[in-house]
Amino acid sequence: MSVLIRIGDVTVERVDEIVLPTSVRWMMPDATREETARCSEWLKPHFQNADGFLLQSIHTFVVKTPTAVMLVDTGVGNGKERSGGIPQFHHLNTPYLENLAALGVTPEAVDYVLCTHIHGDHCGWDARLEGGRWVPTFPRARHIFARPEYEYWESVAPEQEATERLLADSVRPVVQAGLADFVGVDHVVSPEVRLVPSHGHTPGHVCIEIESRGVRAVITGDVMHSPIQCAFPDLPAALDRDKEAGAAGRRAFLARYGDTGTLVLGSHFGAPSVGRITRDGAAWRFDVALDVVEG
């Protein structure tokens, strides 16, 4: 599914790779049914189904500025060895490149690939298998990694087989090809696009902020996996490497973007993935922004 959103002179479309319904308990193990049930009123039907499962997906945001084509996070990738992790990721095979082509984007047309963090569902298509070798999928693109993020994962890879495998089949091919730029966590990519530090889920995690003609949007990365976390930022998230820092990152995100009208684009939120964070008593809620969706 492709959803077109305009942010001033910038457009954003979404290319799905996998749709994954997820239980609230898996996402936030400490959450109670009583606490979370009250959120269903604003989660359904876009972010929660009738059975109470959170509607999530793995997708890429295609960002087109007046001067560049950018991809934000590239999903899992095809043919990756991911045994021992999330079963759906293992040897995945999807028409991802064909779906990009349907938006008029070929691999050669991509100018930048932005990585919010180095996890297997965010940088997998950075490289593809060709002639028995992992090679860059986007041969012209500059691949932007926050330096602290890259350095952390390289430092732990010798002791973590899954991390070593991820770096070998998804990240190092672009590094070895000279296509990687290691930047600060507040790096400015273009006049409209910049990184915003949001460590916690991982040590060098960043969000992607877009601003044009007075309209602001932000791509969450994994500072949140579901809109329900707006209501419970302090509850530990199962996938955060540092639980306390992850909660602090969510609180900072809500303080920065809540009640500001900023369009929030969730990297794992179900379609259409866009909304605004607004006050809900002493907490926050996420209101889907169908008013900005054009496709």
Image (cartoon, rainbow, N blue to C red):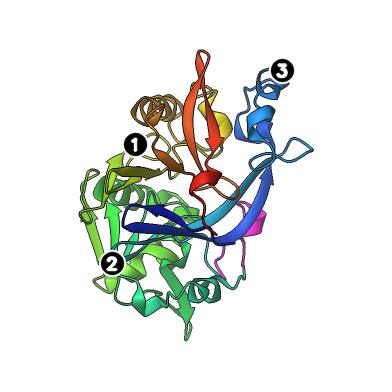
Residue picked out by circle 2: 68
Residue picked out by circle 1: 198
248 and 189: which one is in front?
A: 189
Secondary structure of the residue carrying numbered label 3: helix
For image coordinates 52% across by 75% down, the residue present is 102
Amino acid at dot 3: Glu
- 10 Å crowding of disc 1: few (<14), some (14-19), many (20+): many
Q: Position of residue 228 (x, y in %)?
A: 58, 31
Q: Position of residue 185 (x, y in %)?
A: 25, 44
Q: Position of residue 44 (x, y in %)?
A: 68, 36
Q: Residue furthest top?
A: 282
Q: Earlier in the sequence, mark 1 or mark 2?
A: 2
**How many labels were placed on the picture?**
3
- 10 Å crowding of disc 2: few (<14), some (14-19), many (20+): few
116, above or below 169, in the image: above
Amino acid at dot 2: Ala
